[in-house]
Amino acid sequence: MSFNVFITGTTRGIGLELTRQFLDTGNQVFAAARNTESDALQSLKAAHGDQLQLLTLDVTDNTQIAKAAATLAGQPLSLLINNAGLYRSRSDDVDSLSHETWLQEFHVNAIAPFMVTRALRGNLAAAENALVAMISSKMGSMADNTSGGAYSYRSSKAALNAVTVSLSSDLAEDGTRVVALHPGWVRTDMGGDSAPVDAPASASGLRKVMLGIDDAQNGHFFDYSGASIPW
């Protein structure tokens, strides 16, 4: 059965591959990105036509979030994937990290997913057993942090995990479930060339996990294979 999917950060990497896979399985996809004129998105649009709707969206821009929500007015939304992320601090350490970089990553990685979800809450409630999937990271797990560093990225993903748990409680009354998902260390612009997992494998695993989430798993943290991750 086909359903409506909204995905942020779809220009490349995991977001683009999720867009491709959900289109290939017959779903209506709303793909949001800062640059919808990218060759990859335009190629998918040419292949899938009205099955794919491209939305210009900087997830840190509240005006653009409101405009995207208006575009979906009256549309039930079965799956929201908050995928857009930022890891600008990769080369920073305890001495070099700036508060500007930290604030940017926190905004994109933790605050924006909440704002997008809140704007689309009515669309999610209009669907039966809707799911919000927060693309988090194992680097946000405090129990798994044995190497230190990555202060802004780790803390932003830990904050996203806290947002996930709170929303899983608050949106339960709507029939909407919310989970945090770790996509693996993926060969993307963010993950780098040495990452062991390619984007199609990660997206395929994530999609399988998303489609299998039940009420008992609401508010939990899983990797792309379905294994639980400690907070």
Image: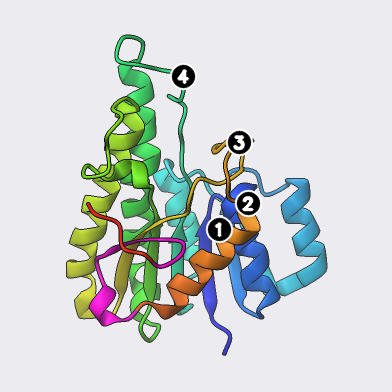
The amino acid beneath tag 1 is Ser
The amino acid beneath tag 4 is Ser
> Which residue position holds label 2?
198
Q: Is residue 153 above or below residue 6?
A: above
> Which residue position holds label 1?
202
Of callouts 4 and 2, the N-terminal one: 4
Task: Report helix, strand or loop for mark 4.
Answer: loop
Spot the residue most to the top: 95
Left or right: 206, with 131 as reference point: right
Q: Magenta span covers which residues? A: 214-226
Left or right: 37, with 27 as reference point: right
Task: Report crowding for label 4: few under 14, some 14 to 19, many 20 or more residues within 10 A (C-alpha).
Answer: few
- Closer mark to the observer between disc 4 and disc 3: 3
Tags 3 and 2 touching, CB below 8 Å? no
Q: Gap in Å between the C-alphas at discs 1 and 4? A: 25 Å
> Which residue position holds label 4?
91
Colour setup of the view: rainbow
> Which residue position holds label 3?
194
Q: Is residue 104 magenta?
A: no
Task: Report crowding for label 1: few under 14, some 14 to 19, many 20 or more residues within 10 A (C-alpha).
Answer: many
Q: Nearer the viewer, residue 27 or 179?
A: 179
x, y (%) of residue 197? Answer: 58, 50
